[in-house]
Structure formats: C-alpha cells, structure tokens
Image (cartoon, rainbow, N blue to C red):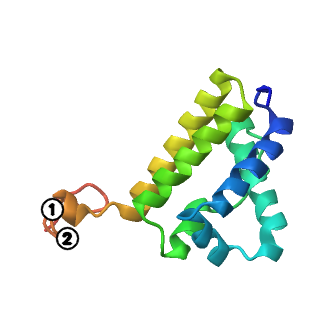
Amino acid sequence: MTPTALNDESLAPFLAAFYGRVRDDPLLGPVFAAAVPDADWPRHMATIEAFWSSVLFRTGRYKGNPFGRHQALGVLRPEHFARWLDLFRETAVAHFTPEDAAALQDRAERIGDSLKAGLFFRPEIAGAPASGSGPSATGAPAR
C-alpha cells in the first residue's frame, strides 16, 4: 500500500482497516462484539469517523461523549488500551506518511491517556488525602 496524506478523505479507509483488525483481534474483538452488534457497525463507524474528523480537522461532526461511552462498557482494562494503540500505530504506519502516522499516533495516545486516567485513576490508591482531610472541591481547606 502506498502511504497517503492524512486528510478527511483518507480517514474512512484507514478507520475501516483499523477496526477490521480490532474486530479480528483475540483481546479486543470480544469487547467490541459485545458492545457493537454486527448490524450496528455501519452506524458505529460513522460515529468513529465523525469523532476523528472532529479531533483532527476540527470539523465539529462529532457531538458525543467518548468517556461516557467507554465507561458504560464496564469491562475495559489497561491492556485493552495498549493493544488498541498497538493496532492503531501499525495500521497508521501502513496507511499514512511517516509524519502523518506519527501525528495521528500521538493524538491517539493522548486521547487514550485521558480515557485511562478517567477510567482507572484512583486517588485513594495514588496517595491522595482521604475524603474530608484535604482541600475541598473549591480549593479551600476542608474543615
């Protein structure tokens, strides 16, 4: 495959190839199969395309809540994100110029880090003060 430039038109074929790999993956495939029935894949892909178009090109096509959608699954683990990013990188490298693949991967990693922080970060485990002993939500000391 000849690498292409990353633009709104090249996004759909890339995402189709990537999510084809995701659906076939032994770790990720079952998660997606449970969350997105086969009949819903065209609608899901349209949503994914709108998301990435909005993230990369500021088209404003996506109006959803990606964190809420991922949180509602209730089954995601850090290894799912690692595998997703591996497949994303491999597919991006195969589809885009090296510069565009690297930029796309960087954006995907930042989004993944944000999702993981929301899904998995536990202040009580990370050494934050117990509830009521630290600053309040406004930043004022708790009483």
Task: Find residue 112 and report its horizontal and vertical position in percent.
Answer: 50, 50
What's under tag 1, amino acid-wise?
A: Pro
Q: Is residue 59 left or right of residue 89?
A: right
Which residue corresponds to mark 2?
A: 131
Residue in the foreground of this view, choosing between 1 and 38 = 1
Residue at image point 76% right, 30% down: 6
Task: Find residue 133 and report its horizontal and vertical position in percent.
Answer: 13, 66
Q: In this view, does 107 lie to the left or right of 136?
A: right
Task: Find residue 110 and report its horizontal and vertical position in percent.
Answer: 50, 42
Q: Quadrant of residue 62?
A: bottom right
Q: Are marks 1 and 2 in contact (CB under 8 Å)?
A: yes
Residue at image point 82% right, 58% down: 46
Q: In which quarter of the image is the N terminus?
A: top right
Q: What is the crowding at mark 2: few (fewer than 14 residues within 10 Å), some, or many (at least 20)?
A: few
What's under tag 2, amino acid-wise?
A: Ser
Give the Cα distance between marks 1 and 2: 6 Å
Residue at image point 82% right, 46% down: 12
Secondary structure under badge 1? loop
Residue in the foreground of this view, choosing between 58 and 77 = 77
Which residue corresponds to mark 1?
A: 129
Q: Quadrant of the C terminus?
A: bottom left
Q: What is the crowding at mark 1: few (fewer than 14 residues within 10 Å), some, or many (at least 20)?
A: few
Q: Quadrant of residue 93?
A: top right
